[in-house]
Image: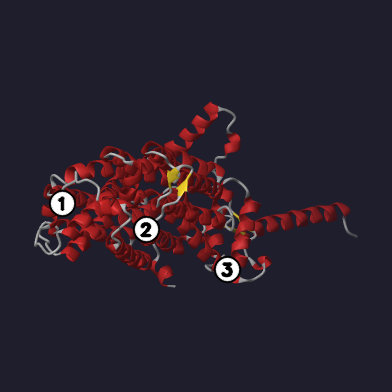
Amino acid sequence: MDNPAYVIDFEKTSDTLKNSKKSEQLQQEAYTFEDAITLTGIGKFHYLLLLVCGLCFMSVMVEIMGVGLIMPSMKCDLESTVSEQGMLASAGFLGVVLSSHAMGFLADTWGRVRTLRYALILSAISTIISSFSVNILMLTVFRFLTGFFISGGQACVFSLCGEFHGNKTRVRYVTLLSGFLPLALIYLPFMSSIILPLQIDTTVLGMKFSSWRILLMVNSALSIIAVVGLYTIPETPKYILVQGDHDGALEVLRTIFERNTGRPRSHYAVKNIILETGGASLTDIHGFKDAVKMIWNQTIPLFYKERYLHTINICLIMFVVYGISQGLFMWFPTILNEMISKDGLGLTTCYIITNMELTTNLSTDICAGEVDTFMFNVLMVIGAAFTVFFLIFAYTIDYVGKKNLLICWLIVSGICMTVIHWITVFYISVFAITLIMAVGNCGGLVSTIAMEFFPTNINAMGMCFIMMIGRLGAVVGANIMGQIIFNYCDLVFWVFLGIVCILCFMGLVLPERKTDKKSVMK
């Protein structure tokens, strides 16, 4: 006869074993985020993501660099001095520098997508208002505000793009995203060559509404299109997971899987993801002290013992490469015009640059609307060449390695800095200066390294911080380049060569996640 006590104990033991097996099974079914995002595949969603992020990145470049192309036409209407033009040229960069830290904080606590939406909307409004400027001061102030708001579109967009990818595809797609920079160099001169030569005599609100004002408004259209695109993109699942919302992250992953594969959401294999912690939220702020404390808490991890040397190294490289490239680019249209006028005389590049007449009065042809479009054609060719470079980067970076590619590019720029002293042929000289300015492309490579180096909870803050330092270098470069290159051209390029040699050694010690070449081949 059965013992009732024994039967009850057996049933309890059996239930306990079943529960423990279920618990073990659930634990076994828990995926890391890296595995979960990889299982969504690559498809339509990621192609749309690249396009939207690319438009965001393009809008930043167009808004910041577009001022240089409207400068000759703008001077006719607003009658600005040389010093006022210098302030206008650096106003956007200064806005980016001052707001980058705040944008990184918002992206890490408020969300990448939401921060980008508001940043681009406000920058577009500021640009449209700036097109109605009645004097150089108003234009400078609103170009500063445009830079202030749009800074989020530069660094946050790398975090947005990267966090939708696994390790196997992240670097390639972030590098492709960087390729939208040269597309901006094609778009800007193309639109300028169409709009700036237009003869417009319309008067709006009592002022002459010249073609350069229309160009500013057209440039803002990129930001508006990018905002529309951002409403088709969800918040990154990695950010949501770090905020502690497991189910929300899983829903986003299912959506990506469905868009990429065309299969039902229920076919997505992942049911449970291992939680990641450390995220901060704006809901935790209840006063000014809380805000300051949270900003400090988001910033100080960048300089923790295990990463502060790498952070400083990355910042120094970004400062130098953007200082050189943007400093030269701001004066490149002026230098290019002078080289065109002296073509065929057998003069070296530096001789032409050091003997320029910078105080020459403005040409009456420009004020009459007769704009020479040859310079725009040259800039479009340069942009196309840069686009090819970035495509090569994107499809070789996984095999060559980010650091190796960075050092190779620095060496190419260094060679051009050496031979520029003896070049007398116009097209070769333009090609050499272009490759020297292309040292700024190294900023994109360093950004991919930084994006993998900083953890998710401070990733946007880290990216915005290094971009802030990079843009600070651009401000310094734009303001001092003209003063030194027009007086000491040969010496400047020799100094640049020495700096590039130092950057090569700094690049060797950058952090880099090791890539499994076999997985890349697959």
Q: Quadrant of residue 374?
A: bottom left
How many neighbours does mark 1 have within 10 angstroms: few (below 14), some (14-19), or many (20 or more)?
many
Query: Which residue matches tag 3?
Result: 260
Horizontally, is 93 left or right of 82 in the view? right
Q: Residue at x 35, y 42 (%)?
A: 78
Determine whether label 1 and label 2 are within 8 Å by CB: no
Residue 353: mark in rendering: 1
The residue nearer to you, when weighing 335 against 170, is: 335
The residue nearer to you, when weighing 191 against 405, is: 191
How much space separates mark 3 and mark 2, taking CA atoms?
Answer: 38 Å
The residue nearer to you, when weighing 474 against 106, is: 474
Asked whether the viewer can see residue 312, the reply is: no
Query: Which residue matches tag 2?
Result: 192
Horizontally, is 9 left or right of 321 in the view? right
Q: Nearer the viewer, mark 3 or mark 2?
A: 2
Q: Nearer the viewer, mark 3 or mark 1?
A: 1
Badge 2 amino acid: Ser
Badge 3 amino acid: Asn
Is tag 3's residue or tag 2's residue first in the polypeptide sequence? 2
Image x and y of residue 255, in percent: 62, 62
Q: Nearer the viewer, mark 1 or mark 2?
A: 2
| Number of dots carrying numbers | 3
Image x and y of residue 486, in percent: 16, 46
Is tag 3's residue or tag 1's residue first in the polypeptide sequence? 3
Q: Quadrant of residue 424?
A: bottom left
Q: 32 above or below 97?
A: below
